[in-house]
Image (spheres, rainbow, N blue to C red):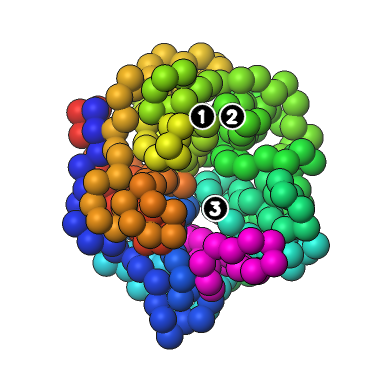
Amino acid sequence: MRLARLTEEPILAPLEDHPWERAAVFNCAVVERDGVIHLLYRAMDRPYGGYNERFVSRIGYAASIDGLNFWRFNKPVFQGETAQEHWGVEDPRIVYMDGRYWMTYTAFGGRKDGDFKIALASTENFLHWERHGVLLEESNKNGVLFPEKVGDKYLLLHRRAPNVWLASSPDLKDWQDHKPLLQTIPDSWQETRVGSAGPPLKTPEGWLFFYHAADRNNVYRLGLAILDLEDPTKVLFRTEDPIMEPELPWEREGLVPNVVFSCGAIKWNDEYLVYYSGADQAIGVAKLEGF
């Protein structure tokens, strides 16, 4: 299995005349409803800096009816408001459940190293949001909801460094039964950390789960796992080799070199499309082959 790029160039790139997204657009969530593909993407107003050089992340919105050509809203649709979001909101993932879109994201306080937590918000129209607060009080990233309950519980993927963990909840508030799901593999392309990409996709074979991994040189690649439908703690399959790695110039050179990173995938016209970012600066799309 591998991901085949649908374009050689990014489908979304920074816009100099939009100050809030002039440095980078990347790490996008994606969801499809009624023939429209909705992207929620992380945008930055300036390159990464130290804690004395403040950059702010916000979330922008774009939509498409063909998966390649996107109309982009001209201002952020979600941005930091609370103390825990002082340096912004990052890396959204989104699912549609119970008549609403539910977005997990990283709330970055920026007050000290490691000041980031998984938070949850919901919307019906991408413009007006209801915040549901921080989900886990620990420093944590890569929060991803399953798109439906499994049994009678909501499920959340998250990262207790350096591995992917799975937790359950009866109400999207109290998260319990934390269990390790995917672990790093020594002397490999997934040696130093692994993290969830987008929400798992339900297929007859199991939950199709894309994830990212980094090696000792901080090169980020993408992998794929299949989780059992009834018990997602059971990993039925995990790719030995990456399904995508940085190859194109804009994936190898940017704010963070040598990175391909995804926060979402969809099923579209009997194909699985993965939306990904290159070098933490622009967004591309690829389709899964061999599944």
Verify CB contact (< 8 Å) between mark 2 and mark 1: yes
The mark lying in front, picked from 2 and 3, is 2
Q: Residues within 10 Å of mark 2 (few under 14, many from 20)?
A: some
Distance from the alpha carbon under mark 2 to that under mark 1: 7 Å
Name the quarter where the N terminus is drawn: top left
| Callout 2: SS | loop
Q: Residues within 10 Å of mark 3 (few under 14, many from 20)?
A: many
Between residues 12 and 31, which one lies in front from this camera angle?
12
Q: Is residue 13 above or below residue 31?
A: below
Q: Which mark is residue 192?
A: 1
| Callout 3: SS | strand
Dividing the picture into quadrants, the one containing residue 176 is top right
- On screen, residue 157 versus residue 109, left or right, reads left
Q: Is residue 126 visible?
A: no
- On screen, residue 5 versus residue 42, left or right, reads left
At a point 48% along the width and 61% down the height, the residue shown is 41
Q: Earlier in the sequence, mark 2 or mark 3?
A: 3
Q: Which kind of residue does numbered mark 1 sit on?
A: Thr
Expressed as whole percent of the image width and height from the top left, the position of residue 277 reads: 38, 53
Q: Is residue 15 above or below residue 110?
A: below
Expressed as whole percent of the image width and height from the top left, the position of residue 97 reads: 56, 45
Q: Which residue is mark 3?
A: 91
Q: Is residue 97 visible?
A: yes
Expressed as whole percent of the image width and height from the top left, the position of residue 22 reads: 46, 75
Q: Earlier in the sequence, mark 1 or mark 3?
A: 3
Q: Which residue is mark 2?
A: 162
